[in-house]
Each structure stands twice: as structure tokens, then as C-alpha cells.
């Protein structure tokens, strides 16, 4: 049955943020992406207004062909590549918040989450990419930055480059019923939102801590780009500011969003608090030079290395890990006060 442009626009207007129009057109990967990102943060949903006629034409052509040859390579798309990197980072941040308690998170959970985000974007429309190669590169990149939230960025970049290198057209298979498609999408949606919801409901305090640390690390990526960093901070406060413009200081704005802003303010000062604690762990005064930090770190590592303290292994292991964590914090560039 041919897809109608008017129906597509109606679904786009009424349920576009949840991907209903993509579900109608048989673009299940695109529908799932919109479900998990609320229409690409709303921006992707708005941008699609001009793309819907081409989506409908593509869906009708696919219905008229029993099988696509899949020959040739799709043209390189900078927009798709950028979306792969962004969604990979997004999936990684969500995994960091909800799954970082896993013992093997940085080896298994993080690269898997980032790789799946990249592959989801790669499968939008009539294109796809190689599953094994993309995930393989993500898993190979992860150990290089083991234990660091910054790992999300290089993993996403490496996986996106690999996905672009192995991009190809989809080969259509037999059509599936709507119930089967909805079942598959539902499982994928639960796999993404389930751990996050469980963490938020049953471990709220730890989840808030993970959110603060994750956002703090995310903002720290932009230390060398103050203008971009200020833009990201503005985006984080956008929901609160939008609500304030609509209702002022009445009702709901004095409740939930004040708590949200408190969390943001905590994130904003989170890095400074960590640095103060790191100075205490290393026994240094605030403002110590990089040479002093490095020298003190080497001295303490020699003193508290577990191999040199076999008579007090547990205490030595604890001090050793604290020293390493403190050194890692102080090794990162500090944001300017006015950032």
C-alpha cells in the first residue's frame, strides 16, 4: 500500500518526536533513534519538515521493489557522520550514568553502548554498516582510555569512522508485520531506558552523583574552547530558562526546576571540589605547579605501591588508588574562573 504524504505530515506533527511518521514509512531505525533522543533534541524533528516528501518517495520505491541489489557505496555524508559521533557520545553518557557500577563497564559496557549508538545512526534510511567491524573498533579503542569518562569521545570517533568506511546500501528482506516490528522496537527501547530508570528509582543518590560527575566531565572536554563551553552550559540550563520565561516564578518553577538548577550548580563547581580534595590527597598546597604535582605523585606511588607493602596490602591498595585518582584530576587543565 502506497504511503501518503498528508498522513506522514499529520504523524510528524502529532507524534514526530516519538518517531511515529518513521514507523509509518517503515524506517524503524530512524523511529527508534527519535524515540531515544526525542526527535534529535527537537532540532532533527524540525529539520525533517522539508525532508518528508523524499522520505515518502523512498518508502514507496522500496515497496515497489522486491529486493534491492545493494551494489555500490552510498555517498559520504558529513551530516550522518556528525550524527553518529553525537549519538555515540549520547549513548555513552547514558551508559556511564546507569551502568558504571558494572565491574567490566569500561571494557564491555561503554564500548558496546557507544558502538550501538553509532550503528543505529548508520542504519537510518536505506543505508547500514558493518556490525562486527564497528563494534570491534569500539572495543579495541576502549582499553586505551580505561577508567576515564573521556573515553566516550575517542570511542565514538573511531566507531563512526569505521562505520563510514564500511557503509553500504541495505538489502531488503521479506516484509514483517507491524506487531513484530513494534515488539523489536519495544525491546530495544527497554534495553536503553530500563537500566537508567532502575538506577534513578532505586539508587537515586548514586544516580545524581553519576549525573553530576558525567556532566562535569563532559563540560571539562571544552576547557580549551571557552565559547563552545559556554554554549553547552547554556544548553544544559535551557529547560529551566524556558520554563521561567513561560511561568515566571510561579508554581512548578519553584519546585522541580530549582532542584534541577541546584544539581547544575553542583556540576558547575564539581571540578573545583575534586581538585581541592586531590591536593589534600597528595599533600600539596593549592596552586602547585605541574612539576611539583608530578614529583609528589612519583614519591607517593613508590611509598604506597602494593608490591612494597605486602604487610598492609589493603591499606596500600586504597592509598595507591587514591593517589592515582588525585593525580589524574590534577593532570587535567583547569577551567578559568569565568568559564
Image (cartoon, rainbow, N blue to C red):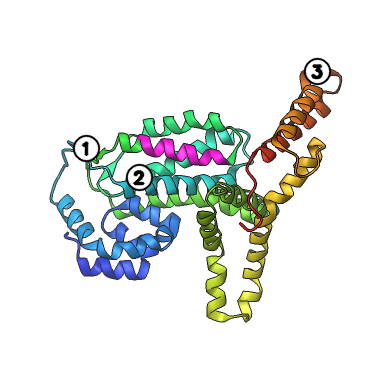
Is residue 235 among the parts visible in the rendering?
Answer: yes
Q: What range of the chain is rendered magenta?
A: 150-162
Q: Position of residue 157 (x, y in %)?
A: 43, 39
Specify whether residue 230 is painted magenta.
no
Is residue 112 among the parts visible in the rendering?
Answer: no
Looking at the rendered structure, the secondary structure element under dot 1 is loop
Residue closest to the far left:
64
Left of 194 or right of it: where is 161?
A: left
Image vertical order of residue 28 relative to residue 318, above or below: below
Left of 264 or right of it: where is 171?
A: left
Residue at image location 29% in from the left, 53% down from the top: 27
Query: Pointer 1: what residue?
Result: 73
Query: Pointer 2: what residue?
Result: 81
Q: Earlier in the sequence, mark 2 or mark 3?
A: 2
- Among the 4 quarters of the image, the one containing residue 258: bottom right
Q: Tags 2 and 3 in contact by the CB under 8 Å rule?
A: no
Looking at the rendered structure, the secondary structure element under dot 3 is helix
Q: Earlier in the sequence, mark 2 or mark 1?
A: 1
Residue at image location 33% in from the left, 70% down from the top: 13
Left of 67 or right of it: where is 128?
A: right
Badge 1 crowding class, 10 Å Cα cut-off, few under 14, some 14 to 19, many 20 or more, is few
Q: Of the residues tagged 2 and 1, which is closer to the observer?
A: 2
Query: Pointer 3: what residue?
Result: 308
Q: Main secondary structure of the magenta part?
A: helix
Q: CA distance from mark 2 to mark 3?
A: 49 Å
Considering the image in quadrants, where does the N terminus appear?
Answer: bottom left
Looking at the rendered structure, the secondary structure element under dot 2 is helix
Image disc number at residue 310 = none
Image vertical order of residue 266 relative to residue 312, above or below: below
Q: CA distance from mark 2 to mark 1?
A: 15 Å
Q: Position of residue 24 (x, y in %)?
A: 28, 60
Q: Earlier in the sequence, mark 1 or mark 3?
A: 1
Amino acid at each position: 500500500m502506497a504511503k501518503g504524504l498528508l498522513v506522514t505530515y499529520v504523524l510528524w506533527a502529532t507524534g514526530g518526536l516519538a518517531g511515529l511518521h518513521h514507523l509509518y514509512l517503515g524506517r524503524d531505525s530512524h523511529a527508534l533513534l527519535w524515540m531515544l533522543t526525542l526527535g534529535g533534541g527537537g532540532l532533527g524533528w524540525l529539520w525533517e519538515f522539508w525532508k518528508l516528501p523524499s522520505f515518502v518517495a523512498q518508502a514507496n520505491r522500496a515497496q515497489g521493489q522486491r529486493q534491492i541489489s545493494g551494489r555500490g557505496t552510498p555517498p559520504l555524508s558529513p551530516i550522518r557522520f556528525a550524527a553518529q559521533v553525537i549519538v555515540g557520545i549520547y549513548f555513552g553518557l547514558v551508559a556511564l550514568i546507569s551502568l558504571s557500577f558494572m565491574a567490566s563497564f569500561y571494557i564491555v559496557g561503554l564500548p558496546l553502548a557507544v558502538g550501538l549508538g553509532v550503528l543505529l545512526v548508520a542504519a537510518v534510511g536505506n543505508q547500514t554498516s558493518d556490525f562486527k567491524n564497528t563494534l570491534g573498533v569500539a572495543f579495541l579503542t576502549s582499553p586505551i582510555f580505561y577508567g576515564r569518562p573521556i573515553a566516550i569521545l575517542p570511542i565514538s570517533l573511531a566507531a563512526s569512522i569505521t562505520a563510514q568506511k564500511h557503509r553500504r546500501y541495505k538489502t531488503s528482506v521479506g516484509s514483517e508485520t507491524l506487531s513484530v516490528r513494534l515488539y523489536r522496537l519495544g525491546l530495544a527501547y527497554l534495553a536503553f531506558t530500563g537500566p537508567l530508570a532502575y538506577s534513578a528509582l532505586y539508587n537515586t543518590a548514586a544516580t545524581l552523583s553519576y549525573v553530576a560527575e558525567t556532566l562535569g566531565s563532559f563540560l571539562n572536554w571544552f576547557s580549551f574552547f571557552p565559547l563552545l563551553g559556554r554554549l553547552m552550559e547554556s544548553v544544559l540550563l535551557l529547560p529551566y530558562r524556558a520554563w521561567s520565561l513561560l511561568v515566571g516564578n510561579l508554581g512548578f518553577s519553584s519546585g522541580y526546576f530549582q532542584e534541577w538548577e541546584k544539581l547544575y550548580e553542583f556540576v558547575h563547581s564539581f571540578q573545583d571540589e575534586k581538585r581541592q580534595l586531590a591536593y589534600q590527597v597528595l599533600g600539596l598546597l593549592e596552586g602547585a605547579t605541574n612539576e611539583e604535582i608530578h614529583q609528589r605523585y612519583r614519591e607517593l606511588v613508590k611509598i604506597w605501591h602494593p608490591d612494597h607493602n605486602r604487610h598492609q596490602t589493603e591499606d596500600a591498595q586504597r592509598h595507591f588508588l587514591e593517589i592515582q585518582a588525585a593525580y589524574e584530576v590534577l593532570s587535567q587543565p583547569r577551567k578559568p574562573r569565568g568559564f
